[in-house]
Image (cartoon, rainbow, N blue to C red):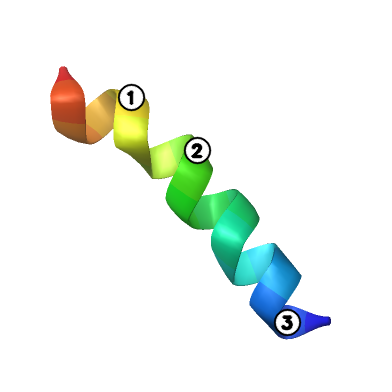
Amino acid sequence: ERLSLAWAVLAGAWPMLLG
């Protein structure tokens, strides 16, 4: 589902946010 994709994107974004 799109929700799963959204979670995957969010998980991928964390490293960038944490720097």
Quadrant of the image containing the C terminus: top left
Check the image and name the residue furthest to the right: 1
Left or right, 15 with respect to 17, comes to right
> Is label 1 in contact with label 2 (beta carbons under 8 Å)?
yes
What's the residue type where badge 2 is placed?
Gly
Compare marks 3 and 1 and give the one earlier in the sequence.
Answer: 3
Residue 15 location (% of width, % of height): 33, 24
How many labels, in total? 3
Quadrant of the image containing the N terminus: bottom right
What's the residue type where badge 3 is placed?
Arg
How far apart are labels 3 and 1 at the CA level? Answer: 21 Å
Q: Residue at x 45, y 53 (%)?
A: 10
Residue 15 higher or lower than 14, as above or below: above
Judging by the rendered image, the residue that carries numbered circle 1 is: 15
Left or right, 6 with respect to 1, comes to left
Check the image and name the residue furthest to the top: 19
Under tag 1, what secondary structure? helix
Residue 16 higher or lower than 13, as above or below: above
Left or right, 12 with respect to 15, comes to right
Which numbered marker is on residue 2?
3
Judging by the rendered image, the residue that carries numbered circle 2 is: 12
Residue 13 location (% of width, % of height): 38, 41
Structural crowding at the residue carrying mark 1, measured as other residues with C-alpha within 10 Å and reported as few (<14), some (14–19) or many (≥20):
few
Under tag 3, what secondary structure? helix
Residue 5 location (% of width, % of height): 70, 66
How far apart are labels 3 and 2 at the CA level? Answer: 15 Å
What's the residue type where badge 1 is placed?
Pro
